Image (spheres, rainbow, N blue to C red):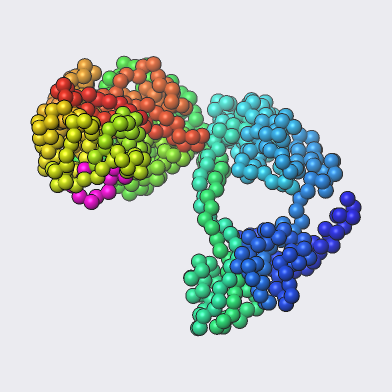
Amino acid sequence: MALSLFVFSAMSGIAQSLPTVTLQGKSFYYYEVKKGDSLYGIAKDNGWDIEKLKSLNPVVALELKKGARLYYPAQDNAPFSKDNIKPDQTSTTKGDIIRHTVAKGETVYFIARKYGVPVDLIYYQNPDSRSSIKAGEILTIDRSIPIDEAVIYVIQSGDTPFGVAKKFNCAVEDIYRDNPGVNDRNFKTGSTIKVAANSNLHRMKSEKVVSDKLDRFSTYKVGKDESWEGIARKTGTSVEELQRINPGTELKRGVTISVPEYEEVETIHRYVAQDPREKTEEGRMEIFQDVTESMIRTHGKVKAVIILDSPSSKKDMEFCRGFITAVDKYKKADFEIDLDIIRGDRAQEEIIEDINRIKPNLIIPTTEKDLPTFLSDYARDNYASLVNVFNLKDNAFRTNASVVQLMPPTAEFNETITKYIEDTFPNRKIVIVSATDEEDMVARLLESRIDNARILTLTLDELQDYPFYETESYLVYATPTKKTDVTTLIDILQNVKDESPLTEISVVGRPNWITFSDGMKEKLCQNDVYIPSRFYFDMGNPDSKAFLAAYRYIFRHPPLKSFPVYAVMGYDVGNFFLPLQAYSPEDYSVIPSTSTPQLQVDIDLKKQGENGGYLNPTCYLIRYTPAQYVDKIKIE
């Protein structure tokens, strides 16, 4: 073993005498190819892994030319080997502080079991270990503070709430909440307090970080009159990096230079969502006031704010009236409701000022597009909930645990409708009918998934002459959105049924058909039409009638007719989220026993991964049946 170590040391000494360059904070040796060199010889002489050398320098490695440069990571020159470490060097322990050197093949779970500590404690104290650990890496583990255990601590001279919170991996807010009345101004030496050790583990947040990572080195042959700046633009790098890896190179026509090539990588950055006010005494006193106020409030109090995107619009006014109808319903409940309605058509600073004054735990914006990021950030940082009612393109719910997406976004909606068609009509011939060349995602999904023998695409004009056979059954998926085109299509299919009564044809239309369905109900029923939708309000339902009566009693007129019915949308949001926020603010997947049915949007929230919020995936197919009644089919 001693001999092999000596040989490696001798070899690595050659590499260590080579010049280096630094890119993205990492050091690389570079070797200038000489006449008679071989790739194997270069790798052997420098103690380098030949496969890694090839992958990092694919162009140069393919054909070695005198003067060309090869690059190799400097930190990889002395690879870690478990066999090279004595047993007493794999970890050192000083009191409860462990410094563990990761051995090849070890996992975080193995290390946690070895020292009898929770996996989460290793993750928290060594954040990068959550994605991976490597042989030779050193993990520091302090096992003196168990997770989620109340520690009794005697305040020392010079201590502050912030310092103690940092020491025990918790928040200043936790100290104030667990020790009522304690703050900076009475934090006395010798006093005993209770500390929620490592409670910051529950404040860990994740965000995706996209960055460029060095993938390999390539070459570039300089053209006539080219400059460093021009080459940098062409190759997607910087002048500084080009000059750094080509030291002393005179830029002239025909010269070959080395160029770094990057790939875009996505990593998960984990951090503690810390209240920035913790760092100053003034800020900590604000936290103390907030905690004190929250502790004297009535249990389960809901502070809701509706932020109107367009305050004078019928949509926003009707939504508010419906929400107020829900508030009125809970006026005798055993929780209190504070409702504020503010304008969202102002400067961001003004809106934030209002929100900071109100301190809501339920935020409801009415915007249909461009949901403000600062609202979802506020909800995340202040442990509030934000219900995105109308916006179908925002993705905050995927990564922000405080955001609720009330209606499925376009991709999820189209996927759900397509799957329903596949599962419900497995043996039908699918006829896709379009009036224009506009893109329709459900049509594209059907074309990609269904056997060519079962699917046919026609224009509206071609449908007129298509021969439907009584021996086959059909599903027509119709993409037209204009009422005139829809009427033409339904009339064509009605003629087919009149001439061939035994021909089985059903139709799936577009969501906007619901807006003119009332005037076509009889024809839609005769042709067994299904209309995809994210919502549907049945005015004949007993619960719907009760809402309409309550609305008329409060506002002295019925709700305005719209699609969706905005007043009903406001009522559904209030009816569902007010008791949920009062009784189960920590987990929106737990429905309170006081919850009552929604009228227009059935809400069944699904948690989106460990760090995501909630999605309501529910959608419907509104079927106009041949029996002349309308059936609301709930799917998800």
From this view, report whether residue 440 is shown above or below residue 554.
below
- Report whether 178 appears left or right of 67: left
Residue 379, given in percent of the width and then of the height, sits at 43, 37
Q: Position of residue 572 (x, y in %)?
A: 29, 27
Image point (14%, 40%), residue name: 489
Residue 464: quadrant of the picture: top left
Estimate the x, y position of residue 516 in percent, counting from the top left: 14, 36
Q: Nearer the viewer, residue 153 or 110?
A: 110
- From the viewer's side, name the closer residue of 331 and 73: 73
91 in magenta: no
Residue at figure coordinates x 17%, y 42% from the top left: 466
Q: Is residue 434 magenta?
A: yes
Q: Residue furthest front?
A: 471
Quadrant where the image shows the C terminus: top left
Q: Residue at x 32, y 42 (%)?
A: 452
Q: Is residue 145 visible?
A: no
Report which quarter residue 213 is drawn in. Answer: bottom right
Residue nearest the observer in this picture, 196 or 93? 93
At which x and y percent is residue 368?
29, 42
Q: What's the magenta region?
A: 433-444
* Residue 228 as seen in the image, left or right of residue 413: right
